[in-house]
Amino acid sequence: MGVTASLRAPGQRDVERWAWAAVVANTVIVLTGGLVRLTGSGLGCPTWPQCTDTSFVPHRALGVHGVIEFGNRMLTYVLIAVVIVTFVAVWRWAGSTRELRRLALLIALGVPFQGVIGGITVLTDLNPWVVSLHLILSMLLVAASMLLVLRVRGLGRDVWPPYAKPVVISAYVVLWVVVYLGTIVTGAGPHAGDAEAPRNGLDPHVMSHVHAASVYVLVVLTVAAYVLLRRTPAARVAMVFLAIELAQGTIGFVQYFTDLPIALVTIHLIGAAALIAGGTRLLVTVVSVVPTTPDLGSSPRPTDASPSR
């Protein structure tokens, strides 16, 4: 009943909730995809789109690895359902704009495209460069979903201190470098997803230090952003982003010196999604320019869409 009502005549809060659902669902699929790799189940279903050459579902001979990989594939359909419902809610909302509808459509189309990349990952026997692309695309969907949340919520129009915008933009660019380098470290490390899966041939210890160096740069830029924004409403957003970075960095160091235990690597994956969401929130808060002219025929924004950070 609640879902039907939220789609029949959705309000701003309904649309924001569905946008948040897209953020959560895209994060969960990152988690389950990570568990597939960490448990060595990457080829639990050895082909795609079928699980085997003769069946769409795993058979007993594939064991628990087949169940884990197949379960991750099934969750993709849950994610597709969530983003489709989100798109419908955005489309039917009286306060929607052309920009919001395009963003929701992009997210909805991105999920099946991500599924195709997942299929290529399996068909290339977990090639580490394709696996890296698979994760980066998931992170892009997390970022797009977070952007949708913020656009639906609405933003105030503050004047930011000099240099704040270029520092925040630089931090966001470095954030994506950090995440990508993390995938390179993973591609060089032991958690390949299958005992026979290839590695990228790079030295994992060297790449770990390169990755750590990029994290240091990100932290310095975020501290600089916080200092510049400390007397503005965006200071809290910058502080939350910095807190996520420090927590994520601590987990990264601990997992490096404890030989990459599965539990910590799993938490680190969720932390990466949280970093992307937090960084996107800071970027949109400080840099984004929100259109002031709605589409012709669109109703004014509801009164409950108060500016929020």
Image: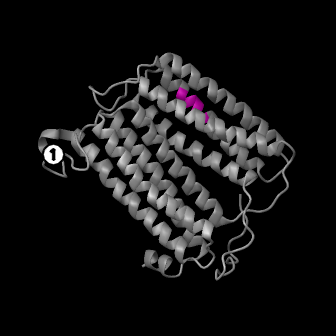
Query: Dot 1 corresponds to which residue?
Result: 53
Residue nearest the viewer, comparing 121 with 226: 121
Measured as percent of width and height from the top left, residue 113 is found at: 41, 52
Q: Nearer the viewer, residue 170 or 192?
A: 170
Image quarter where the C terminus lies is bottom right
Query: Counting other residues with Cα less than 10 Å from the Cα at mark 1, is it few (<14), some (14-19), or many (20 or more)?
Result: few
Please, what is the three-letter code of the amino acid marked with disc 1? Asp
Which image quadrant for residue 242? top right
The residue at 67%/33% (across/down) is: 218
Is residue 295 shown above or below 24?
below
Which range of residues does the magenta coloring cover? 247-252
Q: Residue 159 appears at what percent x and percent y?
A: 85, 55
Please check the rendered image and state whether residue 72 is part of the magenta-colored stretch, yes or no: no
**Quarter of the figure with the N terminus:** bottom left
Q: Main secondary structure of the magenta part?
A: helix
Q: In which quarter of the image is residue 44?
A: top left
Residue under the point 65% across and 65% down: 153
Residue 79 x/y as whole percent = 40, 58
- Tell whether 163 sits left or right of 96: right
User: As displayed, is residue 39 above or below residue 206?
Assistant: below
Residue depicted at 21% across the width and 49% down the height: 50
Q: Quick one: 125 or 269, which is closer to the camera?
A: 125
**Callout 1 secondary element:** loop
Taking 223 as reference, is 259 left or right? left
Residue 38 vs residue 205: left or right?
left
- The colouring scheme, among rainbow, by chain, secondary structure or one colour, is one colour
Magenta stretch: residue 249 in it?
A: yes
Residue 82 x/y as whole percent: 43, 63
